[in-house]
Image (tube, rainbow, N blue to C red):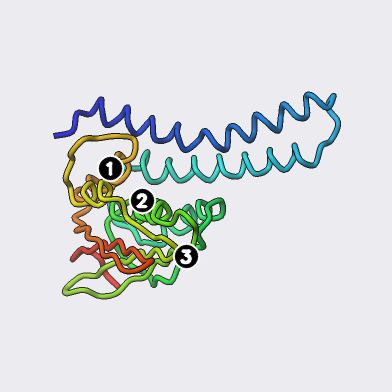
Amino acid sequence: MIENTKLTALVASRICHDMVEPMSAIIQGLEMIKDGDGKTDPDALSLLDNGVGKAWAKLEFFRFAMAGATAEGDSEIEEGRAVAIKLYSVLKPELLWNVPTVAMPRPAVRVIVNLLLIANECLPRGGTVEVAAAKHGEGGEVIVTAKGPRAKLREATALALRGDEGELSGHTIQPTLTSLLARQGGVELSTREAEEQVQLIARSPAFKL
């Protein structure tokens, strides 16, 4: 059983870690403007623009994927599309949203969005992340496929997705939270790997295509 205090602390740590890069860019841009006596500096404005864009996209993602973990009721996968597109606008891989309308419990939408962040972490050199869906038994499955050079799923991440709590850390807290959300939403998670490809699969009888 995961202690709530430890879970909260690690989620906060993960959010802070991801916000360091964009906030550093914003601070550097402001310092450049200050050193230039307030004169317009294209490089400073570029840093500010990139920093603000990344910070806003990541905050929107975390608000939806993590702070929205208490969401209940029915929804559709489309609810997560806007935040996913915004997040990938500041990441290396290209997002390919090739999924039809899929009705699912609201916690399951959070599961899919979290899988998209995990997919990005599987691609150190960029590539593509495709979201697709198909019928599976009486329900359906959503498949997130990460393709690119040296695509790899960390073993600790795979274990966390399977529900093996193990030793929690800043690296495993996000897949651990994804696993907890999956249980809440009645979603079964699995993974597949091939050469330069990682697939993250979410299945549920509650998915309706």
SS type, badge 1: helix
- Quarter containing the N terminus: top left
Q: Name the quadrant containing residue 142.
A: bottom left
The residue under label 3 is: 128
Mark 1 in CB contact with mark 2 (< 8 angstroms) = yes
The residue under label 2 is: 114
Of the numbered discs 2 and 3, the one sitting upstream in the chain is 2
Q: Nearer the viewer, mark 3 or mark 1?
A: 3
Drawn side of residue 182 relative to residue 86, left or right: left
SS type, badge 3: strand
Q: Nearer the viewer, mark 2 or mark 3?
A: 3
The percent position of residue 164, horizontal first and vertical second, equals: 16, 45
Using the image as rendered, state which of residue 150 and residue 53 is in the foreground. Answer: 150
For label 2, count other residues whose C-alpha is less than 10 Å away and answer few (under 14), some (14-19) or many (20+): many
The residue under label 1 is: 177
Label 2 to label 3: alpha-carbon separation: 16 Å
